[in-house]
Amino acid sequence: MIKRTNRMALAAMRTTGLVWSSDVGSVHLFDTVKLIGVQANDFHFHAIDKIQHRWNMLLVAVGIEPSGSKYVKQELHALTEPRFHTATVDYFNQEHERLLATINPKHGKQAGWIATPFERDFTDAEVMRILRV
């Protein structure tokens, strides 16, 4: 039963990523192909909490100029060994603070991250759409 659950959980995450943004304030799932939200199910929860992944974490800092125009700074951090997502929190928080510090202090700031258990590159436009900023 456990092996079947693990297979189904991994299949559920095949094109699913996690996203958080300071605008939305909570983590939600999204389809990495269609770039739309995904309703979480038990297999998603199992894959995230019970299975280690080589997480790819895209840290994002959005600067907002006085004119209202936005620009994106992003850094991809790819883990080389599988880890539970909870084991990565402190490291990614530190790296995110460092990235946010690179935004001009006279500009507004928004933050976000996109995590996938597989490699996936996102354009700036895709990042803005996924983060809803």
Image (tube, helix red, strand yellow):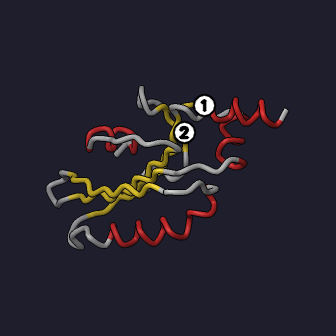
Circle number at residue 72: none
- Residue 64 vs residue 72, the one in the foreground: 72
Quick one: label 1, few (<14), some, or many (20+) residues within 10 Å? few
What secondary structure is marked by label 2?
A: strand
- Residue 36 vs residue 65, the one in the foreground: 36
Circle number at residue 29: 2
- Which quadrant is home to the N terminus? top right
Residue pictured at 61% horizontal, 57% vertical: 83
What secondary structure is marked by label 1?
A: loop
Percent x, y of residue 3: 78, 35
Q: Is residue 117 left or right of residue 127?
A: right
Percent x, y of residue 126: 32, 38
Residue 124, above or below 89: above
Residue pictured at 14% horizontal, 55% vertical: 67
**Which is more N-terminal, label 2 or label 1?**
2
Q: Is residue 82 left or right of residue 32?
A: right
